[in-house]
Image (cartoon, rainbow, N blue to C red):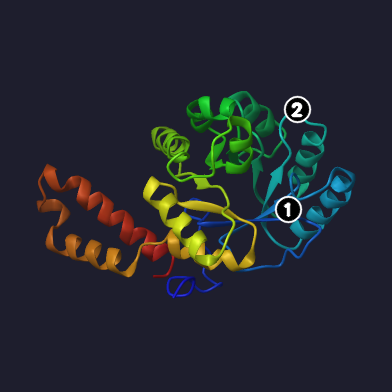
Amino acid sequence: MIGTASHPSPRLRVPANLARSWMLRSPLGVLDITACDALVIDLEDGLPAARKDAGRDAAAAFLERSPAWVRINAHGTEHWEADLAMAAAASGLAGVMLAVTESATQIDATAALLPVGTRIVALIESAVGLERCSSIAAHPSTFRLAFGTGDFRRDTGMADDQLVLSWPRARLVVASAAAGIPAPIDGPTAGDPAAVLAAARHASDMGMTGKLLLRDEHAAVIDEGLSPSPQAIREALDLLAQTPVESADGSYAPAIARAQRVVDRAAAFGL
């Protein structure tokens, strides 16, 4: 059944490097949700221009009682510094998601206004950002990359099609792997649970391990699509049992490494 079989207990806290479902939520809405792996308070698209100050106040109040990520406005916009000032002072800040990241210099400037070690998810939403994604991923303050599919399509004219967007997705995956950071987070998908599940499975096939979402009912579906299936777990366990690492020759190394990743992710998700 979609969205139920592999969704872990809400009490199981998934580390951010493995987080699958990244919920974007306006600070002026209901923030107390537990269905997703990571809650992102959205100060960018989640707020109209006239309510940015009220949204920051609401975000600050929430972060005093519960941890969350914060999506801040793009570098160079009028709200970027104010968003950072709020986030930097918040005791519950898990990290920031920088909208429309287009250079490593923007990561530098953002990190300089945050406590040392604050994790930054760089949201790639433009052709310029994609062209520079390798240097962005390699910046020491970059924690993960994320793909802002809607704004990217608006900037490039690309269609909302899995085949068309496979190339930019692959670039983000390769840039992340080359930089040694966790795999990227895919953009949100609208539609019914079946469409969201198919999109999550496609993202997983592309090498992505997270996905943004806007609706509560999509969280469990995304977690299912980005988690190892029961069959994949059984096959991985069988391979590891039949081929001990110490006795395997080099030809088995890739398969063993993939099997170990499946088992490790399954354990992290309580599967």
Above or below, 146 against 175 in this view is below
Q: Residue 191 falls in which quadrant of the image? A: bottom right
Query: What residue does disc 1 label?
Result: 91
Q: Residues within 10 Å of mark 2 (few under 14, many from 20)?
A: few
Residue 119 appearing in the image: no
- Residue type of the residue flagged with mark 2: Gly
Image point 58% across, 25% down: which residue? 128
- Split into 4 quadrants, where in the image is the N terminus? bottom left
**Mark 1 or 2, which is nearer the eye?**
2
Q: Position of residue 149 (x, y in %)?
A: 57, 42
Tell me the quarter of the image containing the C terminus: bottom left
Q: Is residue 4 left or right of residue 121?
A: left
Total numbered badges shown on the rendered structure: 2
Q: Residues within 10 Å of mark 1 (few under 14, many from 20)?
A: some
Q: Mark 1 vs mark 2: which is more N-terminal? A: 2
Asked if labels 2 and 1 touch by Cβ distance under 8 angstroms, the answer is no
Q: Which residue is mark 2?
A: 76
Looking at the image, which residue is at 51% across and 56% down? 19
Residue 68: horizontal and vertical position, in percent? 67, 56
Is 178 located above or below residue 42 in the figure?
above
Where residue 208 sits in the image (x, y, percent)?
44, 47
